[in-house]
Image (cartoon, rainbow, N blue to C red):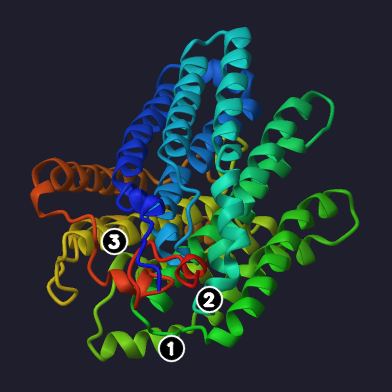
Amino acid sequence: MNSDIHHKQHWAVGTYIDLMLAAIIMQIIFFFASVWVGTYGSDFFDKNLEEIQYVLRMQIGLGWMMCIIAGLGFSILPLIYDVPGFEKTVMRIYVTMNMSGQFAIMFGIVSRDIAVFHTLSTIGLTLLCGSLICLISPAMTIFKSKKIESDTMGAFSYSIGAIMPILGIVTIICWIARDYLNGVLKISEALVFDFFIPLAIIATIISHINRRLDWEIIKPSNTGKSYGIFTILLLLAVISEPLSNSGDISMRINATLSSLPYFFIFIMLNPKQIITKIKQGNPYSKMVITAIFWLPFIGIASYMEIMQYVETTKAMMSYYRWILIFGFSFQALWGFAAFLHDDHKRVSIHRRKSQWLILVTINLGTLVTIYSMFSSWYSGEILIQYPRYGIALYALSYILILIYWLKDIFFSIDDWHKIPLYYDQYLAHPEQGPGFDLELSND
């Protein structure tokens, strides 16, 4: 056996820290831009409602949320597939383009000049989409190497990276075509929030529970089927709205198709078995697991809004997306990242702090949001703004997360190890160690 072990692909282990910091900085930029619009830019916002809404939402979906997703992917996927292709240059280009794009969008919004806004927003979206397109090389490396991955994750693992570059291309095409095709920005937005984000977050959750905790909530033989059905249901949800608007399907069918993916994947995640594992005292990330139980409420909110049981103004994001982003996705991503960080700090899985204050504030914010939605349904009143208490709780949870990461990264770095706890669970060839090349070893 050749003892030449290649470690090139494993430089990326732990690079999630850089991208977590980028996400934190970009969240500050996003909240600054949002607060500015609400405080000083109301007239400018009202006159350019659709485009400003779109670029702000792309700051969320393709900006700081994508930084977290990419950071987790850069840190874990090279271990799982044990292949080269994750270069420092690629990551640096990605971070630089992504952050520059978000800054450009922010400056365009605060300029309050429509010509400057269009120019800087186009530059910003081009950079955001370009940052995704530059990931095509590592994404294809992973996709081509999918045969060496076990059935623990299946297509949930390798397809997310392959979708990212395509999403970047489609998004920039839709932005350019917005003056020629009516509703194209809504389709683009739906692809990000109603298709990609749910797929990516569910992949993260399954990775935590099936691979990291070894709970096998979805049987290995069913992962591919579950992924395929979930993907089809999400695509049907995306196309159901334009079909409903054109009169090809009824409003009720549209509402059913839009809510169905969340009920389906909630059932497939086997909540009964999850509760059983929790009762048995098995350790887990409380934020990741709690996020799962908001899935039915995302489906309910989607159904109620499409059926117009709950109505909001055009200036607001739909309640179902508000819950999807902040109650579900926001919580699952930060929970997964914190658990991975504890792995790198080699903290025993039985002695990990639960960050109760962060957990409580996020979920109280979601409860307040859902209560507001049901109150509107009961009273029949149109909602003109999100509940302030809910926004305040989400803001507090964000500040607490910011404090946690800054403290852990800058003041606890001595406890951090490049090789994480349970490292072998992520390796393609655990018995040979990291960087093992099966073909080279047989030469």
Left or right position of 386 against 158: left
Residue density around tag 3, few if under 14, some if 14–19, many if 20 or more, within 10 Å:
many
Secondary structure of the residue carrying numbered label 2: helix
Residue 281, image x and y in percent?
22, 87
Question: Where 49 falls versus 334 (above or below)?
Answer: above
Q: Quadrant of residue 277?
A: bottom left
Quote the CA–CA distance across marks 1 and 2. Answer: 10 Å
Are discs 1 and 3 less than 8 Å apart at CB?
A: no
- Is 69 rendered above or below residue 292? above
Marks 1/3: CA distance? 25 Å
Sequence order check, earlier mark of 1 and 2: 2
Q: Earlier in the sequence, mark 1 or mark 3?
A: 1
Q: Which of marks 2 and 3 is in front?
A: 3
- Given the image, on which type of amino acid does mark 2 rest? Phe
Mark with earlier residue (2, 3) = 2
Residue assigned mark 3: 340
Residue 311 is at least partly visible in this image: no
Q: Mark 2 points at which residue?
A: 266
Residue at image location 48% in from the left, 58% down from the top: 83
Residue at the disc numbered 1: 272
Amino acid on which the number 1 mark rests in the picture: Lys
Classify residue 353 as left or right of residue 58.
left
Which amino acid type is marked by label 3? Leu
